[in-house]
Structures are given as C-alpha cells and as structure tokens.
Image (cartoon, coloured by chain):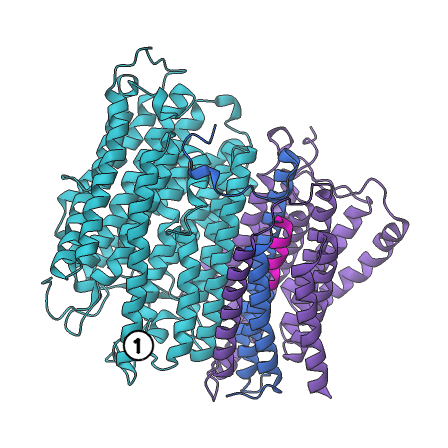
Amino acid sequence: MSALANAPFYVTTSGGYLLVLAIILPAVAVLAMLLVPPRHVARIAFAVMAAGLAVALVIVAELVGTGMALAYVVGGWQPPLGLALRADGLSAAMLAMTAVVICATGLFARFHQCLEPETQDGRAATTFWPLLMAIWSALNAIFVGEDLFTLYVALELLTFAAVPLVCLDGRAETIAAALRYLMFALLGSLLYLLGAALLYGVFGALDIHSLSRLDGGAPAVTVALGLMIAGLLAKAALFPLHLWLPPAHAGAPAAASAVLSALVIKAPVFLILRLVLDVAPSSAGPLAGQIFIGQILIGQILAVLGASSILFCSVMAFRQQRLKLMIAYSTVAQIGYLFIVFPLAAGTETLPAWGTIAWTGGALQLVSHALAKAAMFMAAGAVAEAFGHDRISDLGGFGRILPISALAFGLAGLSLMGLPPSGGFIAKCLLLTAAVTGGHPWLAATILAGGLLAGGYVFRIVDRALATPAVELVARRPIPRRLEAVALVLALAAVGVGFVPLQPFGFLQLGRPAVSAMVAP
Amino acid sequence: MNALLDVVLVAGLLALALHVARARDDQGAIVGFIAFGFLLGLGWVRLASIDVALTEAAIGGGVTGLLLLRVEAHTRDSSAPDRTARPITIAAAAVLCIAVTAGLAFVILNLPSPPPTQAPAAAAALDATGLENPVTAVLLAYRALDTLLEKVVLILALVGVWSLAPDHLWGGAPELRPAVVPEPLSYLARVLPPFGVLIAVYMFWVGADAPGGTFQAGTILAAMWLLVMLAGLRAAPDTRRVTLRLLLIVGPAVFLAVGFLGFAMAGGFLAYPAGAAKPIILGIEAALTLSIAVTLGMLVSGPSKRAPTS
Amino acid sequence: MSSISNPATLFGLCGAALVGIGLFTVIVHPGLLRRIVGFNILGAGIFLIFGAVARRGAGAGFEGDPVPQAMVITGIVVAFSATALAVAMLQRLFDLTGRATLEPPAPEGRPGSET
C-alpha cells in the first residue's frame, strides 16, 4: 500500500456526487417528514425510495463502467483536514443491497399499514418512516465514509434510528428490549470513539487512507483497534455479546425486524472489516513480524467468536417456541459466518485479502443473508398478522392458508442452510473450500455443522407449514397477496444471487489495488 | 501555581466521578455529576479550549443535569434495585476497567513527539473561510458534513423521544411545570431570560472570530426557554404545531440548501463561493442556533403528556 | 515519555481514569439511571483524551489542534441526544411497569418464557 503515488489520494470522480446524494436524500426526507401532516409522510418516503434506489443503481453502473472507485471530496477540503467519501466494489454492493431491502421494506410496511386504516396516520405508523429514512442515510454514510469520526456520527445516527423502531409498539417488554439494545449500542459507540481519539493522537488524522499508510505506533494502534473492534462487536451482537439482539429484533414490528436483522447489524461488521483490512498495519514496515502476528491473532479471536456464534445460536434458534425469536437467533448464527472469514481471507505478499475466495464468500454471505433474513421476517410478519400469534406449535398447516409466505420462508431457508440453488450456497461453498484448502479443518467442520443445524430449524417450520393439524387453523383476517409477495420477491432474490457466482469476483475488487496473482485458493 | 490548580481540578474530578459510581441514592449521584460538569468546564479552560469549556458547562453540566434531575424526581419512588451484581462480576468488571485505564494511560504517556497536528493545515485554510475561530471553521467548513449529520442525529433523537408518548397523547404538549412552582424559580424565570437572550446573541455573533458559536448560543436560549416553561409562565407547545416543526428544521434545512447550492455556485456540495464564505456561514449559524435551542428544549421536555388541542 | 506536570498529559491521564470509572458504573450498577450517568462520565473521559491530544497539537498560532476540539463539541451534542433518548425510554418503562431497572437478561433464551 505504501507504493501509492504522492498526489492526493482522494480526487472527486465524475460520479462522485452520487455518494453525497446517497447520504443526503434520505436525510432531506427526514426533515420534510417533520413538516408535513402524517397522511403525506409515506408519500415522501416513496418518492425518496425511488430516487435512492436509482442513485444506488447508477453508482453500481458507474463503477462497472469506469472500473474505478467513485470518490468525492466534500467541499473541496482535502483529508485529513477535510472529509472524503469513497465507494469501491464492496461499498457499492452494500449500497445496492441496502437500497433493495429498504425499498422492499417500505412496500411491505405500507401494505401492512393499509390493513388498519384507523391507525394509518397514528404515532407508530407515522414515526416509522423518518426512522427508516434515517437508517438508510446512516447506512449509506457508513458504507462510503472515509473518516473514522464521520463513521462515528453515522453509527450514532443508526443507533438513534434503530432503537425507537424496536419499541414502536410501546409495550413494556419492547421498551425494556430497546433500552438494553441502547445500552449495548452506546457502549459500543463510545469504545469506538475512544479508539478513534487514540488513533488521532498517534497519527493526527482519521481518514482511512492516511491511517493505512502510516507505520509505527504499534502498541497504541493495538490498544485503539482492540477498543474499536470490541465496541463494534457489541453492536454486531457477536457471541457472547448477543443477548440484547433476540428480544429486540423479535419484539419489533415485522418491517422493522426485517431492516434491523438484514441491514443494521451489517454496519458494524462492515466497519470491523475496514479496520482490520485497511487500518491495521500491513505487513510492511520495520516491525513487520510483530504486527503481522497481531493481525492474525485478531483474525483468530474473531473466528473463534464467530464459530461459537454459529454453533450456540443455531442450537438456540432450534429450541425457540416463537417464530420471530427463532429467526432472531438465526441472525446471530448467520452473522458468525462473516467473522470466520477473517483468518480464511488472510492475505499474503502476492495475494491480498480481497483476492481470496473467502473474501468473495463473505461478501456473498452478507448480501444473501440480508435478502433472506428480510424475507423471513416479512413472512413471519404475515403469519403473525393472519393468526394473531407466532407460537410455532400452534401454526400447524399455515402453509395451506399462506402458501406464498410459506414458500418465501422455505426459499429464504435454502440460503441460510447453504443448499443449492441460493446465494447462501455459493457463499458457504466458497468459505468451506477456503477452510479446507487453507488448512482450517475446525472451521470447515463448523461451517458444515452450522448448515445442518440451520436445516434443523428451517425444516421444523416447513414441517409445521405442511402439517395437517387436528384442529383446522383459521386465519384471523385475510392477508393481501401483495403483502406476502414482497417477502417472496426478496427470497427469490436471495436464491438469484446464487446464479451470478463469478461476477462478484471482479466487481468486489474494483477500487482496490490490483490483485497480482489471480484467484487461486 | 497553575500546576497545583491542575492537580486540584483532576483530584476533584476523580473524587466526584467515584462519588457518582458509589453514591447510595441517585439524587446524590446526579448532584455530584452536575458539580463534575462544572469542574470539567474549568478543566477545558486549562486545556486552552474555551469553545469546548463553554459547551461542556452549558450542555454537559447544565442541561444534562436538569434532564437527569427531572427523571430522578419522576422515578424516585421506584423500589430500590433488589438485585446487585455478584462479587465475581464486580471483581471481573474492576479488573477489566483497570486494564482499560492502564492501557489508555500507557498510550497517553507514549504519544509521539513531536505531536502530529492539523493546526497548521487549519490555519492555512482559514483565509479561504474569512473566519478567525478555527473551531468554527472545522465545524462549518472543513468538516461541515459531520456537523450536518450531527444535526440530523439531534432531530432524530427528538423523533425517538416523541415516539414514546402513548398513542392518544401523540402530537400533544409535554408538561414541565411542577405541581408547585417554587417562588425563586418563578422570579428567575421573569428576570433571567432577557439577559440570557443577550448573552446568546453575543455568543453567536462573536463565534465566527472568538470562542463561542451556535452550539453555546443555542444551549443558552434553550435554557432560558426551559426556565420559562418550568416556572409555568408559558406552556410547552403541542409537538405537532407547524411553527414548532418549522423552527426545528430551519437550521438543518438552510445548511442543506447551502450545501446543494454549492453544487451550482462553488463547484461542489458544501463548498462555499470564494469571498462569500463568512456571511454564508453566519447565516447557517443563525438558523442553526434557533433550531438547536428548540431541539434541546424539546428534548429536555420529553414526550407529550397532554392530548393535542383541537 | 511525557512529563506528568504538563496539563495535556495530566488531563489525558484523568480522562483515562474517568473512562475506567464510567465503564465500571455502566457494567456493574443495576439502576438504569445510574448507568446513564456512568455513560456520561465515560464520555467525559473520552473527550478529555481528545482534549489532551488537541492541547499537544498546539501550533500555527493556535493553543490547540482545532480538529479534535471540534470533534469534542460534536461529541458532546451527540452524547446529550443519547442521554435524552435513554432518559425518555427509562421514564416510559417506569410509567408502564413501576421499575427503573432491566430484568435479568436470562429468561429470553429459555423456550416458551415469552408470552
């Protein structure tokens, strides 16, 4: 990385302004929503969702067209004094995934709200929209922000949008869950900020490019990164810091659960990836050996926690009696896969991390889990709406009444289990290959065991869906097809990711130094 | 002499922090925290950061203290927590916290010399902004995007607070006035606000060139408004009132509008046209001061306690 | 190794100690209100470390590096927002249940515990 030229690294590219729009458009929506009467709030949301989706897709198209990262220097002030935004292939993939899930969630939420016209302009329905828009703005800022302090503000924005979503229904249990979530999230942000303070003290800069080029200060950097990663782990709900997640994600309204599980917890994971990959000192420099061992050690610890998450929380998911809690535990388990990527994608002199198949596998896992998990929570929302509860034992035969939701659940389940055809299959296949060829037998075993356990909890629900109960299951109210269709579309998208297996290789490396030796595990 | 003052300040801060951690009742802890906030303001003066000292004294000590005291009074009759942490948890937490402090102390004692700094870069760029207070330049020019996002954070916190109202009260007004208004409070609420507003206007005005600025001015305005509402001289407005909503968003909206105008007039988002930066920044700050005052005031007031009128 | 008599180092070390005290309160204290105060102590410690870094970076005619000073101002406002949201949630929880603590986190993992 030190071989880069001396000219400013951040130069505004032709499509760079799109990155500004990706962050600012939803923020404009938040302000506008405060001003208009409640009945117009959803309209603003839909206008901005259309625009935001277009922006995300144009960013991807620009990236593919130019083959280069998009960048924007805000106000013309060069980092490290000023701020820059930058989207490489991975960031652009995150932006596109986020836009798709947010738009689907918006549709689902609107169809859901239409079921109860009397509360449509009420507190919960109206408040949902500015919170959703703020989550979008914060996520986009996290995916394209290049300054660790900008990322801190974005993380807090994300927290303040996500926490009220959890307790939108106003019940005491959900407020308790939201408060516990807030405690973990605040602790996480503050530890992150503390690390940033130390990094500024050592380097006098917080933009990721400056940090990636500076050597030295090894012990201080270790302390700083340790604090930041620990804080982000609390936000990402990795075992054993996961206790806040199941009640929070299961208690939220269905649309909110979908966004929280699919997108919100991906933000800290993404930041950990950037810290380990771009900020942690590379193998160059006088203290190379020492630092490099440190980086590997971080990777090993993250992998152990990830593997524990997969095994422990998959078992927990299997034991849940409530559908939404089961899906929430499954989230913690699936997030675990993203952490076993770290040792598997450890780069070498000739092959940087983003050239490995584990890197591609991890990115695919992130995207396909987001699509599949949003679909599952929406299907569970339709089930809860139809029957008035989500007790798994009393749902026998729900597939006859809600065939589309049952199908969406099953298809999304393929991705979680890692069965073909699905994005999850390709992702887990790549991770498994990397584990076997890289000499990590215990990680390979974990991936296989996690797949079997996921099969257990998914088939348990599919079995309920197809069962013939002694007492005929009756829907409390008819569920409109369009509500169920949103979940199905997302589940199909998760399956569809499995059909573009080789495209990601090139796309995910855009904007990163060229991979000299092409992919060979 | 100064070194002695520093040692006394630090000792006071640590003693008050320990008091907060160990005090038996919450009220004592909060009073300790308020004193802590004012000592901390002095500490910032010793660190030669008057801007931060003013912010810390106003927000960190003052408004946060008021917020905490109100909730403490509200929840006082809750049964004392029956569950205290187990000794093993306490021991583990103590070891962890001591390790964190030791690690931090090690890093702080070994920070590089000469220290890396952006001060020369900030000074070199100051001419382009026409400002003389470098902190204002960082907040509203060099790193304006952070400040803009932080404004959205404030508004979002308010959306979150308002969402905690019961359904039938949503859109109504919060209630600050206690059942009995003490006479001194009522007196202060009549006497102080004109002076407070003057100080706020002064702080805003000098902020471009001297310590002070939109945050400090906004906080003082908010404090005056809260005083008036606490004394019952003016009721809190309905949270759905359009004028209130307009005041809330005018600052961020002007900021965003200037940002977008930058695309057309200065070659980029949040870029200021050469020569006109200072008046534009002052305009943004004026709008922000109003919005910050209203947002902080409503954040302390809490969710609606009365059904919306009409 | 910096001299402790230097105010930047002294207040930086004070910040380190405050982080420890704040963190301890947040982890150990059962009362939610006290934890919220603990978060504020923790935040104050972090800001002091920023302040020490800023003071060390004095130069070019300024008595401190303005970039971390500005970050602290932004940070104080964000911390206040967090406190306001947490306090409002605590108050609502108290209004609904009469409790100002979170129940022990064990039950939600047990099957069938939630109704």
Residue A295 place in picture, x, y as percent: 30, 70
- Which of the pair B251/C52 is nearer the observer? C52
- Residue A341's quadrant in the figure? bottom left
Mark 1: which secondary structure? Answer: helix
Against A314, is B98 above or below?
Answer: below
Which image quadrant is residue A71 in? bottom left
Q: Nearer the viewer, residue A227 or A411?
A: A227
Pointer 1 residue: A291
In this view, A362 is above or below C4: above
Residue at x 58% of width, y 83% of height:
C62
A232 on left or right of A456: right
The quadrant of the image that shows the N terminus of chain B is bottom right
Magenta part of the protein: which range? Answer: C31-41
Vertical relation: A106 (above or below) B71: above
What is the magenta segment's predominant secondary structure? helix
Q: Residue at x 48, y 53 (%)?
A: A185
The residue lying at 16 percent from left, 47 percent from top is A426
Position in image of residue B19 (x %, y %): 70, 63
Q: Which chain is purple?
A: B
